[in-house]
Image (cartoon, rainbow, N blue to C red):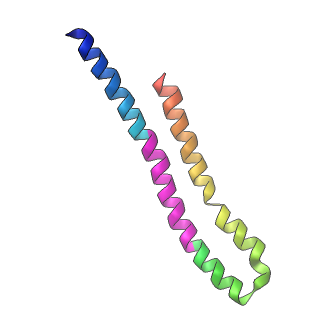
Amino acid sequence: MEGGLIEIGLGLKAGLLGIGAGFAVGLAAIGTGYAQGRIGSAGIGALTEKPELLGRVILLVAIPETLVILGFAVAAMIIILLGG
């Protein structure tokens, strides 16, 4: 019976690590989507008035993507450092 309890404990640890990593990426993606939606709509409004702002608008839309990259890095650290 003890062997069964150990296997359940390891499965629970792996599951909780997976949930934590999923939250790290998922919540970062939700925040990025929200930010990009607001920035994109404001950027299109600005481009209709001043087309020369295209480079700045593209840059401002790309900046929130770093949040997802950081979320992925945190998820990888959770799995690698705590999963081992």
| Res 77 quadrant in image | top right
In the figure, is residue 51 to the left or right of 11?
right
Asked if residue 31 is among those painted magenta in the image, a careful observer would answer yes
Quarter of the image with the N terminus is top left
- Is the residue 1 above or below the residue 42 in the image? above
In the figure, is residue 18 to the left or right of 12?
right
Q: Which residue is painted at 26% across and 10% down in the image?
A: 3
| Res 43 quadrant in image | bottom right
In the figure, is residue 51 to the left or right of 19?
right
Q: How many marks?
A: 0
- Is the residue 7 above or below the residue 38 in the image? above
- Is the residue 25 above or below the residue 50 in the image? above
- Is the residue 48 above or below the residue 3 in the image? below
> Extreme top residue here?
2
Spot occupied by residue 70 in the image (x, y as percentages of width and height): 59, 47
> Extreme right residue here?
52
Spot occupied by residue 29 in the image (x, y as percentages of width and height): 51, 55
Spot occupied by residue 57 in the image (x, y as percentages of width and height): 70, 73
Spot occupied by residue 60 in the image (x, y as percentages of width and height): 68, 67
> Extreme left residue here?
1
Residue stretch rendered in magenta on the structure? 21-38
Q: Which residue is painted at 54% across and 60% down in the image?
A: 32
Q: Main secondary structure of the magenta part?
A: helix
Q: Which residue is painted at 61% across and 60% down in the image?
A: 64
Q: Which residue is painted at 50% across and 53% down in the image?
A: 28
